[in-house]
């Protein structure tokens, strides 16, 4: 996304500016460094010698503060740059409508996994659409895209302006001393960022300013319950077969049920992956749109960047097209299994041609079923709303596609428009002919302004306004549009181009009378009924089109595949070298009492949301403690800065050596959002004696 919503400014009074393009270690990507006008010398570690590591960013300057946001999410409270001292910080400026921002998320997750103790990612959500300014909607986006780092709602773009950002996505790097090092915009920069982070780690580890204590955040996902459907994306109704197909996107599977709600098949194990095979073993990654020919179901496997094919008769899943890697270039197409795709979002089939709404490159692609190739069909690849011949027109994140057999109808989510595109009826894929026009919404405005003409206005043609529409279905002489960010279904007359609100109050909700929706993304019509993927409500709603009355559509027998395993990020903890204690002579009895006293940095306290836990192991043979008490993680009792627990014994006397580990979390006092995690280990020789003085084992922990 290249539009600049406001002039970038410098951090007030700091006198710094972006001045240099650094080609880092031969990378073709450019990392833009920041320079403080007062910086004049190269920094080295205080203990400089022949092997000293030089600061890779000597012209760094103090970073602006992360103040000015409406609310913080995925954390217990606000976070400041000072709170993050000792960590390399990657600040991600994003907005959840933006496909490029979505493409950056896997890179961020990979970086968080590679540098769990050195790196903290902070998301700054600076909204494009009005709907994206609402904290509750950002929370849903965090859950939908499975984001595991803190996010601040920068609804008024205060932090955006402080950092001088001018496009989504932009990634800013801060060093462990809270200094601004530089930024990079756009997607596909993981390798460059790894090189930047590696150099910062080397320098600050040498200098002693790198804090490798893990941090832990209060994630939004810990506050929600499992539901049978999770952010369902698209729907397909097979009226002749009496079936409804649902892309259960965040469960990474497809659900097939009868039109009266009886479960027939679940396609996919629920695990993220791209495995082919039997229905219950196959894997998907957030699938979206579908198309059906006979007993073959074609699936847009969006985050795998694949087109999959499900043989419903043989009950097998295979891959039709794509390499599994995201296409970051404007490739015209090629052999099915050799051509990388870019976020295929929806599908439709017309006279043996599979049309693909390819959201990533802002294009429509096509594949003649039975052939070995696929390629671009409409759209230049430029993100805009521009009418014209197929190859010169411009689309903006096409996210829904349907056909009446003569034309394609497409919703351009980023352009908030409904497009009409000629089909291949009299053409071939080698030389397609036809035009792209705009049925409703603005188009052909200068300097990409069409991307920012959105709203909630009923009207005719160019005068109508949508807000990030995602779904579309064909009705009698009209198309129905899931106007997602307006939480409505709108009707667009194909002859008059008149747009009217059909269902929805304009506010997100769960009421059935009057019917409320929450970012609906998929529609399907059959038998006088409309089926709606009410995405953020995790449900399907069925509407009687004659009476406009709606009801929930439960699926008998459908259950969640179960909660995902806790991420590696949440499991990390500081590993401290084992402390070996002297022999502990304790009075014989029925238990061994342990007490742990913690000392934390000023302003920090034990994290009540992460109870202190312990695990006891035996070194060699032992008979003092029951085997059931060993190698089991258990919770201690905490009060203030002390934790205590007792281990039952089964023999009144004897000697053994135990290995004890205690894991704890600690946070800033008050409403602070940064929490750290530590684990301390002890080797403890124990002797129980009849005549020993009664006492327990007292341990001390000093956290960094």
Image: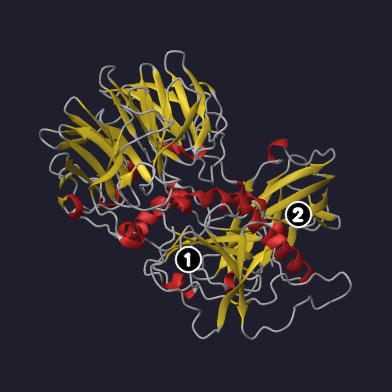
Q: Judge left or right: residue 69 versus residue 339.
A: left
- Evaluate whether residue 199 shows in this view: yes
Which numbered circle lies on residue 77?
1
Tell me the SS state at disc 1. Answer: loop
State the image coordinates of residue 627 (x, y, percent, origin top left). 73, 36
458 above or below 495?
below
Q: Residues within 10 Å of mark 1 (few under 14, many from 20)?
A: some
Please identify, in this view, whether the residue under mark 1 or under mark 2 is nearer the observer: 1
Q: Judge left or right: residue 74 versus residue 247.
A: right
Determine the CA span between mark 1 and mark 2: 30 Å
Tell me which corner region of the image, top left, top right, bottom left or bottom right, holds residue 201: bottom right
State the image coordinates of residue 99 (x, y, percent, origin top left). 44, 50
In front of the other: 58 or 464: 464
Q: Residues within 10 Å of mark 2 (few under 14, many from 20)?
A: many
In front of the other: 279 or 101: 101
The answer to the question of whether label 1 and label 2 lie on touching residues, with beta carbons closer than 8 A, is no
- Evaluate whether residue 636 shows in this view: no
Q: Judge left or right: residue 217 versus residue 227.
A: right
State the image coordinates of residue 560 (x, y, percent, origin top left). 43, 33
Tell me which corner region of the image, top left, top right, bottom left or bottom right, holds residue 536: top left
Tell me which corner region of the image, top left, top right, bottom left or bottom right, holds residue 539: top left
In front of the other: 435 or 262: 435
Location of the C terminus by quadrant is bottom right
605 above or below 685?
below
Q: Judge left or right: residue 177 versus residue 433.
A: right
568 above or below 529?
below
In front of the other: 527 or 442: 442
State the image coordinates of residue 101 (x, y, percent, origin top left). 47, 54
Mark 1 or 2, nearer chain start: 1
Q: Which residue is mark 2?
A: 681
């Amino acid at each position: 996304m290249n539009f600049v919503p406001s002039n970038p400014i410098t951090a007030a009074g700091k006198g710094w500016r972006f001045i240099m393009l650094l080609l880092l270690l031969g990378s073709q990507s450019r990392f833009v460094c920041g320079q403080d006008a007062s910086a004049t010398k190269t920094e080295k570690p205080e203990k400089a010698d022949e092997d000293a590591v030089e600061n890779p960013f000597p012209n760094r300057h103090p970073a602006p503060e992360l103040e000015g946001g409406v609310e913080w999410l995925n954390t217990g409270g606000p976070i400041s740059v000072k709170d993050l001292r000792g960590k390399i910080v990657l600040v991600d400026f994003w907005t959840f409508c933006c496909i490029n921002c979505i493409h950056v998320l896997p890179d961020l997750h990979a970086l968080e996994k590679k540098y769990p103790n050195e790196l903290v990612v902070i998301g700054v959500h600076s909204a494009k659409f009005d709907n994206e300014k609402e904290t509750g909607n950002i929370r849903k986006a965090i859950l939908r895209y499975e984001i595991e780092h803190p996010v601040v709602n920068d609804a008024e773009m205060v932090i955006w302006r402080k950092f001088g950002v001018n496009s989504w996505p932009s990634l800013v790097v801060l060093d462990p001393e809270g200094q601004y090092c530089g930024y990079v915009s756009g997607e596909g920069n993981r390798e460059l960022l790894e090189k930047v982070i590696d150099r910062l780690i080397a320098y600050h580890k040498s200098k002693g300013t790198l804090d490798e204590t893990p941090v832990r955040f209060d994630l939004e996902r810990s506050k929600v319950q499992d539901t049978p459907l999770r952010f369902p994306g698209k729907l397909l109704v097979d009226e002749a077969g009496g079936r409804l197909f649902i892309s259960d996107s965040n469960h990474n599977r497809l659900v097939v049920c009868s039109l009266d709600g009886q479960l027939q098949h679940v396609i996919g194990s629920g695990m993220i992956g791209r495995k082919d095979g039997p229905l219950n073993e196959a894997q998907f990654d957030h699938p979206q749109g579908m198309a059906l020919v006979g007993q073959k179901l074609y699936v847009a496997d969006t985050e795998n960047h694949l087109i999959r094919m499900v043989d419903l008769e043989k009950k097998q899943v295979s891959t039709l097209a794509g390499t599994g890697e995201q296409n970051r270039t404007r490739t015209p197409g090629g052999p099915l299994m050799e051509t990388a795709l870019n976020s295929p979002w929806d599908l439709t089939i017309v006279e043996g041609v599979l049309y693909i709404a390819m959201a990533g490159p802002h294009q429509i692609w096509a594949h003649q079923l039975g052939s070995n190739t696929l390629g671009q069909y409409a759209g230049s690849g430029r993100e805009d709303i521009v009418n014209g011949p197929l190859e010169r027109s411009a689309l903006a994140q096409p996210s829904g596609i349907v056909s009446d057999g003569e034309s394609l109808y497409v919703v351009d989510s980023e352009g908030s428009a409904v497009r009409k595109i000629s089909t291949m009826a009299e053409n071939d894929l080698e030389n397609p002919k036809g035009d792209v026009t705009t049925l409703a919404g603005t188009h052909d405005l200068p300097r990409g302004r069409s991307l920012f003409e959105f709203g909630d206005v009923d009207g005719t043609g160019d005068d109508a306004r949508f807000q990030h529409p995602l779904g579309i279905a064909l009705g009698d002489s009209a198309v129905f549009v899931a106007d997602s960010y307006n939480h409505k279904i709108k009707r667009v007359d194909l002859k008059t181009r008149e747009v009217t609100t059909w269902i929805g109050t304009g506010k997100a909700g769960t009421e059935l009378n009057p019917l409320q929706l929450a970012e609906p993304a998929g529609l399907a019509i059959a038998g006088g009924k409309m089926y709606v993927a009410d995405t953020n409500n995790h449900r399907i709603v069925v509407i009687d089109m004659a009476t406009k009355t709606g009801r929930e559509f439960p699926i008998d027998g459908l259950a969640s595949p179960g909660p995902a395993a806790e991420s590696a990020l949440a499991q990390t903890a500081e590993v401290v070298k084992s402390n070996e204690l002297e022999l502990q002579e304790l009075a014989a009895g029925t238990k061994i009492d342990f007490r742990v006293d913690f000392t934390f940095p000023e302003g920090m306290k034990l994290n009540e949301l992460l109870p202190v836990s312990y695990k006891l192991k035996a070194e060699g043979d032992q008979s003092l403690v029951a085997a059931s008490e060993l190698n089991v993680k258990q919770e201690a009792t905490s009060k203030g800065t002390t934790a205590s627990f007792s281990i039952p014994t089964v023999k009144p006397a004897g000697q053994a050596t135990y290995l004890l580990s205690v894991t704890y979390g600690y946070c800033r006092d008050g409403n602070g959002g940064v929490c750290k995690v530590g684990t301390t280990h002890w080797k403890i020789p124990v002797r129980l004696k009849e005549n020993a003085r009664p006492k327990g084992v007292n341990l001390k922990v000093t956290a960094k």
